[in-house]
Amino acid sequence: MNTFQAHIADLLACPDCDLLLEHKHIEPGQKACCPRCGHVLHAPKKNSVDKTLALALAGLIFFIPANFMPIMTLDTMGLKQAGSVLDGIQGIYDNGYFFVSLMVALTSLVFPLVKLSLLFYVSLHLKLKRYPHDLPLFMRWYNHLDEWGMLEVYMVGILVTIIKLHHMAHIHYDFGLICFIGLLFVALSSSISMDEHEFWERIEERPA
């Protein structure tokens, strides 16, 4: 029975065509592709844990100024008005769109913060070779939340605002915009640099 379980653990199913393949170790820079459909099964990334940990920490540092400091200041006929991400959410709520403001708050504030915190927690423990019992749970939570962090959608909204208002008002770009761009870049880079296969392999190999 143990031999059978070990053999099953060495098999890998293609997510596209369900072909069972033998799981083999490959080096960073190489790709394992399904011979039937050509789907990329695994593409290891070099120093994935270190890079992911550094990016997650940078994202947490960027988070507060990116969301609570003014993104831009509009100057119209001498009247200046600055706004941050939090101000935008508050403005939507004040106009009576409670559900919309809640969704914007979740996708631009809550979910990105929780996602970065989970990624930092998991990668830090893997770096230190510490394996608490809740590590697999936090890893699964991160995977579920990965689809809900929509900072890029908010960035598109900022760009649309700039395009529509640059003829009507003089726009001053504040420090919050730089931090928000940095946060967006870090969030996308952390998803790219993270080798999910390596993370799960390290978690599964933890001592009993």
Image: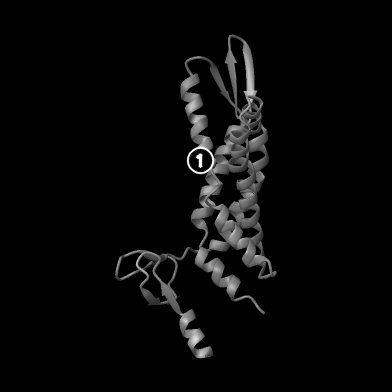
User: Is residue 126 in view from this perspective?
Assistant: no
| The furthest residue to the left | 36
196 with respect to 139 (left or right) = left
Q: Is residue 207 above or below residue 47?
A: below
2 with respect to 69 (left or right) = left
User: Is residue 110 in view from this perspective?
Assistant: yes
Residue at image point 49% right, 19% down: 166
- Residue 84's x, y, as percent? 63, 30
- Here the colouring is one colour
Q: Is 13 or 180 nearer to us in this picture?
A: 13
Q: Which residue is mark 1?
A: 152
Instruction: Examine the image and state in which quarter residue 107 appears.
Output: top right
- Residue 182's x, y, as percent? 57, 41
| The furthest residue to the top | 77
Q: Is residue 76 above or below residue 113?
A: above
Residue at image point 60% right, 62% down: 139
- Residue 146's x, y, as percent? 54, 52
Q: Amino acid at mark 1?
A: Glu
Quarter that holds the C terminus: bottom right
Q: Is residue 49 above or below residue 1?
A: above
Q: Estimate how packed mark 1 is, as few (under 14), some (14 to 19) or many (20 or more) residues with alpha carbons within 10 Å.
A: some
- Residue 205's x, y, as percent? 59, 76
Q: Is 106 or 72 nearer to us in this picture?
A: 106
How many numbered badges does the structure rendering display? Answer: 1
Q: Is residue 163 above or below residue 54?
A: above
Residue at image point 66% right, 59% down: 121
For label 1, the SS is: helix
